[in-house]
Amino acid sequence: MDNHEKNRYSDVELQEFKEIILEKLQIAREELGALTQSLSSPNVNGTDDTAGTYKTLEDGSATLEKEQINQLAARQKKFIENLEAALVRVENKTYGICRETGKLIQKERLRAVPHATLSMEAKLRQN
């Protein structure tokens, strides 16, 4: 029995991770919502009747800002997908198992990066 426990986390531990993941998911979704909203809302700080010279400068920075927000939103979407995949692994009871070594990923690492699929050992080997 003791040996069996070593190759997966217990249901109690999985439940703890599930709560961490759900909390992070909620925050990530809210942040994505805020990013998406700031992309769809017209530029709040720019009034249309500002002098022509400043207008082009503003447009440039607004475009840059939009690209940055788009990148952040894309990254946030990916993060949400990774967290959702982690939830599936919790349900399958395969959560927290390194996909390279088959060993358990350290709890500290999973608490910090709940969607991790590699142990530090395997991650360091990749570099």
Image (tube, rainbow, N blue to C red):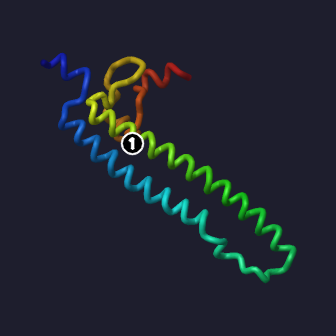
Residue pointed to by mark 1: 84
Q: Is residue 119 above or below residue 78?
A: above
At horizontal 44% and vertical 59% (from top left) the residue drawn is 30
Looking at the image, which residue sits at the far right?
A: 53
31 left or right of 110 in image: right
24 or 81, which lies in front? 81
> How many residues crowd around disc 1 within 10 Å: few (fewer than 14), some, or many (20 or more)?
some
At horizontal 49% and vertical 23% (from top left) the residue drawn is 124
Q: Position of residue 28 (x, y in %)?
A: 44, 53
40 or 116, which lies in front? 40
73 left or right of 92 in image: right
At horizontal 40% and vertical 56% (from top left) the residue drawn is 27
119 or 100, which lies in front? 100
Looking at the image, which residue sits at the far bottom?
A: 49
Work out which quarter of the rendered image holds the C terminus and state it: top right
Rendering quarter of residue 10 = top left
Q: Position of residue 57 (x, y in %)?
A: 81, 67
Q: Position of residue 123 (x, y in %)?
A: 48, 25
